[in-house]
Image (tube, rainbow, N blue to C red):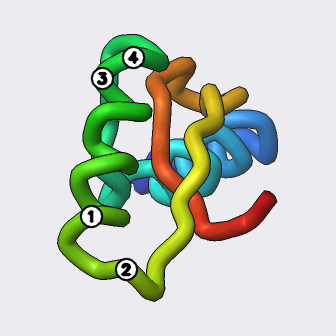
């Protein structure tokens, strides 16, 4: 049986979703902000921010401003 190759568009989608695979996901901004605050309390040297991902539409944490 021949192998099925992904189209370039499908390959881009797989790569984009793979970038979110190992990140913590939050359903809303409030939950993400609460998690960021907790992490910053546990480690005073960490500064975290939240953002809504363009790929998966969940909220993630980042150290970038």
Query: Considering only vertical position in the picture, is 17 above or below 51?
Result: below
Please name the residue shown 60% across and 56% down the image.
15
Question: Which tag, 3 or 2, sits closer to the chain's start?
Answer: 3
Which one is in front, 63 or 11?
A: 63
Q: Which of the 4 image quadrants contains residue 50?
A: top right
Left or right: residue 33 versus residue 53 is left
Question: Which tag, 2 or 4, sits closer to the chain's start?
Answer: 4
Tell me the crowding category of disc 2: few under 14, some 14 to 19, or many 20 or more residues within 10 angstroms, Cα based.
few
Q: Position of residue 27 (x, y in %)?
A: 33, 15
| Label 4, label 3: how far apart the Cα atoms are | 4 Å
Query: Considering only vertical position in the picture, is 15 above or below 63?
Result: above
Residue 31's disc number: 3
Tell me the crowding category of disc 4: few under 14, some 14 to 19, or many 20 or more residues within 10 angstroms, Cα based.
few
Q: Position of residue 32 (x, y in %)?
A: 38, 32
Residue 1 visible, this angle: no
Q: Say which residue label 4 marks.
A: 30
| Label 2, label 4: how far apart the Cα atoms are | 21 Å
Residue 62 visible, this angle: yes
Please name the residue shown 51% across and 44% down the image.
17
Mark 3 or mark 1, which is nearer to you?
Answer: 1
Mark 2 or mark 4, which is nearer to you?
Answer: 2
Left or right: residue 64 versus residue 62 is right
Mark 1 or mark 4, which is nearer to you?
Answer: 1
Instruction: Determine whether label 3 and label 1 are within 8 Å by CB.
Output: no
Q: Position of residue 59 (x, y in %)?
A: 48, 29
| Label 3, label 1: how far apart the Cα atoms are | 15 Å
| Label 1, label 4: how far apart the Cα atoms are | 17 Å
Residue 41's disc number: 1
Q: Say which residue label 2 marks.
A: 44
Mark 3 or mark 2, which is nearer to you?
Answer: 2
């Amino acid at each position: 049986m021949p192998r099925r190759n992904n189209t370039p568009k499908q390959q881009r989608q797989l790569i984009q979703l793979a970038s979110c695979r190992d990140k913590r996901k939050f359903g809303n901004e409030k939950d993400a902000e609460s998690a960021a605050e907790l992490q910053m309390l546990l480690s005073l040297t960490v500064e975290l921010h939240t953002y809504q991902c363009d790929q998966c539409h969940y909220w993630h944490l980042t150290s970038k401003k």
